[in-house]
Image (cartoon, rainbow, N blue to C red):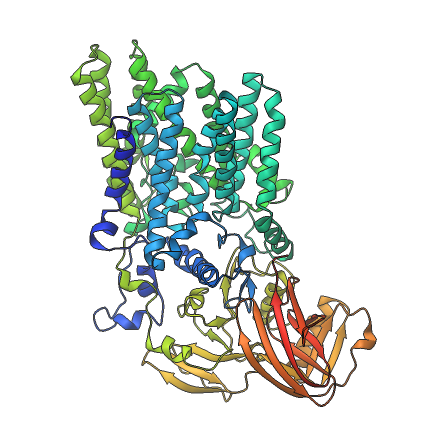
Amino acid sequence: MKKFLPFILVTVVVAIFFWQFFFKGLLPIPSDTIVGLYYPFREAYFKTNPNGLPYKNFLVTDPVRQQIPWRNLVTDAEKRLTIPLWNPYNFAGTPLLANFQSAAFYPLNILFYILPFNISWSLLIFLQPLLAGIFLYLYLAHLRLRKIASLLGAISFAFSGFFVAWLEWGTILNAALWLPLILLSIDKITEKSQVSKMRWSLVFVLSLIFSFFAGHIQFFFYLFIFTFLYALARLVLAKNKKSLVYFAMLFLVVFILTLPQLVPTFKFITLSARNLDLPAWQTNPGWFLPWQNLIQFLAPDFFGNPATLNYYGIWNYGEFIGYIGILPLIMAFFALFGRKDKKTFLFGVAFFLSLIFALPNFLAKLPFQLNLPFISTAQPTRLMFITDFSLSVLAALGLDYFLENKNRRQILYVLGVMSLLFISLWFFIMIIHGNILSAASLSVSRQNLILPTVIFIVVMILLTILVFHRKDNKISRMLIGTLVFVTIIELLRFGWKFEPFINKDYFFPSTSVISFLQKQKEPFRIMSEDSRIFPPNFSAMYKLQTLDGYDPLYLQRYGELMAAFKRGNQDISSPFGFNRIITPQNPTSGIVDLLGVKYVLSLDEIKNPKLKLVFTDEVIRVYENIIAFPRAFFVDNTLIANSKQEAINALFDLNNSLSKTAVVENVQNKNLLKPNWSSGQVTFVRYEDNKVVLETGNSGEGFLVLTDSFYPTWHAKIDGKETRIYLTDYNFRGIIVPKGEHTIEFYDTLF
């Protein structure tokens, strides 16, 4: 029983953190922002909450705006035994599997095949700190640390600032939590027998693959670099050159097995606007970790907290928070300045390097000045993952060293330095703050410094007693247990303050407006005239297609088209100003008609002859665009463009003639495209995520336009015979259709 006690304790602590989910049915999903911030959901609660329902944390909205809609699409497709290649609901069609964050191949997705989506997602969130804590405990125990020290490291990592800030995203922590198991497998491979070596090799490969498939490429990149360097250091220190080839083979196996995700993602990146539409790192004050935010290692809410609506610090609280608890921080620094061994050196180097490259300095800025691929688009504050992981390991090393060291008085030096830091903070707040902080900010900092100070004083007193209490008896064990207990309570409180646990009824509820739209004949698109209505990606939860979208990866062609649409001219130059979020809001444009936007949602009355009011719930007005183009149609003429600038110029010149003339690019044999085509009839037989089936009839050869985004993995067949798809109207698809009646199939493929 004693063998399993630490795992039971980790499980109990994590379960206590999630007690509202297990005992009250509240979900660790920020769906209060759905009904608290956005229409048409807010009006469902107007009678009881005329000003909208309160929401806990405005910072935690991305899970319901990105990860949850994408995972819902993925699991829906996989339940139908279909590869989730395409998302037809946003950006006028966009890759789904290739966007990486959809995590289509993540093994823990098995939860979604067994239980309802909202429960499965909640369990996925619950498993993150649980697995992270268990895996790190296993690794620390392998380092032959005492159980209480290993437990401290495991808990401090599972509820560190990094874990709390990203807990409800469902991708980032799933990518990160495998790191301690990977490090453990590296150690086991280099130490054990041939049979054990094979078993741990499998663990190593699977852990890396699981991390990769978890859905966040930047955090996997940091994990991979750390893994590679750790393996290299382990082999060099062990003088085991033969294993270098063995590990190279294991990494090769990982590379091969991840190709089904890697190849589509790489293709999408090369066609995306990722490098063109990010805010300049030089002008973004939160791109690096601000020096003053190092205070948050001592007092996490010194600059306030978004959950209490008093955060006054730079940019994004979640990007900067590296808190691991007062006792773990003390023990981490005690290890750094007391222990003299390779383990401490390794994780000390990892801690300092991750922090150096997260802070604004010459070394950290160098990759961005050199414009290194991938790294130059990755925000360095997310190195806090490695920082917190290293600190948690160092905390365990420090406590173990404290317990085994007869000369415990070394800890007094660390306590003295920490005391000076707290005194300096109070001195600043009480005396020398000057004009640096406003009265309101000063009040926030003062209030949020009290608890960390009290905890530090309690920890300092208990450690001091231990220093001068030399006998290893029940009192010493009780004091150590009390210190760890205080840390657990401290970290649980820190997490509870930030994380929302929300009523399950708020999880993407239906409304009368949504029901009306879902009853209309498909396919069609909708758009809103206000960013408060149906924010990007929400529509995917209801299988409604829109022009908008929110994704770090979106097609450059589509971004250029929407930029020109927004600017009202042929300017397609970058930057586009979207910063991952495209929300077209001008329903009067001819491009809206071309893209088949049949319904427009508005909070205000719209007076336009092409828009007819067809539904209202007394708050949201739904207008029908009576001149919206069919989603597939024949044109009378085609124009050939030799460049994308020529294409966008022609598109704007045609404006009101887009239903009759299509602009076609990348035409090698211009004789194939004639100026006059036969018109015809088009009927949708099937419209699915990865497949569109049409039936056509025309008296002569015709040119058919389908206003879904052009992408190289899409193919077309006419009566079962392959035909070419032409890049049409800047971002869409066109094919030549012979005369007569035909069945046309557009279908997507993995590569």
Q: Is residue 152 visible?
A: yes
Task: Please name the residue shown 60% across and 41% down the image.
Answer: 255
Farthest residue to the front: give it. 195
Q: Is residue 452 visible?
A: no
Relative to 108, 159 lies left or right: left
Residue 18 rendering spot, x and y as whole percentages: 26, 46
**Quadrant of the rendering where the C terminus is positioned:** bottom right
Q: How many marks?
A: 0
Closer to us: 139 or 473:
139
Is 399 placed above or below 719 here? above
Residue 278 rendering spot, x and y as whole percentages: 56, 53
Q: Quadrant of residue 248?
A: top right
Closer to us: 629 or 292:
629
Closer to us: 193 or 642:
193
Residue 183 rendering spot, x and y as whole percentages: 47, 30
Is 21 placed above or below 707 here? above
Residue 403 rendering spot, x and y as whole percentages: 29, 16
Task: Please name the residue shown 62% across and 76% down the image.
Answer: 706
Q: Quadrant of residue 41?
A: bottom left
**Quadrant of the rendering where the N terminus is positioned:** top left
Relative to 497, 623 lies left or right: right
Is 336 placed above or below 441 here? above
Is 431 placed above or below 522 here? above
